[in-house]
Image (spheres, coloured by chain):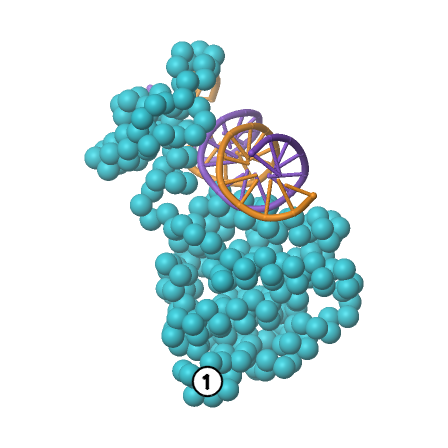
Chain colours: A cyan, B purple, C orange
DNA sequence: AACCACGGCAACCGCCAATAT
DNA sequence: CATATTGGCGGTTGCCGTGGT
């Protein structure tokens, strides 16, 4: 494969920069497969790569590592990102620890390109107002979409999504009931269980069962060692919908923009 | 068909903390 | 203990594909 001309960097005579070639990827992958990762500067030299150790590390962690998950973020993952960002801010690596297979870079890009863009359109000075708006208005629609995807896949109607968002509707709310698919649901609604307290999320959260490879989890979702389960009272779909529609503290303009977010996020799933 | 604007994302940069010497 | 090196993180840049005109 023809390599693009290397960009000369001071001190190092021939360090390459820019997009990685297939040949470089192969070299890096084979080397790490045989020798493991770490000692990136040494690794770069030994692998025969004319790259900085940093560059190799980044390429491996963000692209080549076998367990990297590809494709659009699932609704569950999107919810989790919104939630964790509201809790931790721009701690991308920390947030990424809770989304198996997703990299901090990917989450950061998602946030900047999708979420912040909407914040700008809303003319909301970033975090608080916008996040509150997202929390209270996006939630029911997104939950419905989660339910739809699980229905389409013929899986259990019981879908779990961690959602402190619901606290903005009612702090004691942990379960929101949304319309179920009559094909597989014994009743007319199915429940989405959410933790009432998201502040105690364990450092190592395994959401593999909920989001890895696009699966929707049955029953409750395992977050760390404890299952989040129904606690408190339920909100039926009509109530959720009306809350969505009747949040009168928010402007029409903001509501419109938030609906656009729904469109944007849901389109990815269709 | 050509041009332009925009969005998404891979890759880089700069800083800082941890670790090695 | 001081300094150098390495690794990790968040912010930013720039390329490329796509859609609109």
Q: Secondary structure at mark 1?
A: loop
Q: Residue at x 46, y 15 (%)?
A: A9
Q: Is residue A178 above or below residue B1?
A: below
Q: Which residue extends farthest left?
A: A34
**Count of marks overlaid on the render:** 1
Q: Is residue A53 above or below residue A264?
A: above
Q: Chain of mark 1?
A: A
Q: Residue at x 37, y 47 (%)?
A: A68
Q: Which residue is mark 1?
A: A182
Q: Residue at x 34, y 23 (%)?
A: A2
Answer with the quarter of the image where residue A53 lies.
top left
Asked whether residue A87 appears in the rendered view, the answer is no
Q: Residue at x 46, y 50 (%)?
A: A96
Measured as percent of width and height from the top left, residue A30 is found at 24, 34
Decide which of C7, A191 is in the foreground and name it.
A191
In the displayed structure, does residue A226 sit left or right of residue A128? Answer: left
Decide which of A80, A71 is in the foreground and name it.
A71
Q: Which residue extends farthest bottom?
A: A187
Crowdedness near tag 1: few (<14), some (14–19) or many (≥20) residues, C-alpha within 10 Å:
few
Measured as percent of width and height from the top left, residue A14 is found at 39, 14
């Amino acid at each position: 494969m023809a390599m693009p001309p290397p960009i000369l960097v001071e001190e190092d005579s021939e360090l390459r920069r820019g997009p990685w070639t297939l040949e470089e990827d192969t070299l890096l992958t084979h080397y790490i497969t045989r020798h493991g990762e770490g000692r990136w500067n040494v690794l770069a030299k030994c692998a025969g790569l004319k790259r900085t150790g940093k560059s190799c590390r980044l390429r491996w962690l963000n692209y080549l590592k076998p367990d990297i998950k590809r494709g659009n973020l699932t609704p569950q993952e999107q919810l989790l990102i919104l939630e964790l960002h509201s809790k931790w801010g721009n701690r991308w690596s920390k947030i990424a620890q809770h989304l198996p297979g997703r990299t901090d870079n990917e989450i950061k890009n998602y946030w900047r390109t999708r979420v912040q863009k909407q914040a700008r359109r809303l003319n909301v000075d970033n975090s608080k107002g916008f996040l509150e708006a997202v929390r209270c208005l996006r939630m029911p629609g997104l939950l419905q979409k989660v339910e739809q995807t699980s229905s389409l896949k013929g899986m259990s109607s019981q879908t779990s999504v961690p959602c402190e968002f619901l606290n903005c509707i009612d702090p004691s709310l942990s379960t929101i009931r949304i319309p179920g698919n009559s094909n597989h649901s014994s009743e007319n609604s199915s429940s989405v269980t959410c933790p009432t307290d998201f502040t105690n999320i364990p450092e190592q959260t395994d959401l593999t069962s909920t989001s890895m490879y696009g699966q929707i989890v049955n029953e409750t979702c395992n977050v760390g060692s404890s299952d989040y389960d129904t606690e408190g009272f339920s909100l039926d779909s009509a109530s959720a919908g009306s809350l969505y529609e009747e949040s009168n503290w928010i402007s029409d303009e903001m509501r419109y923009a938030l609906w656009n977010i729904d469109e944007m996020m849901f389109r990815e799933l269709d």
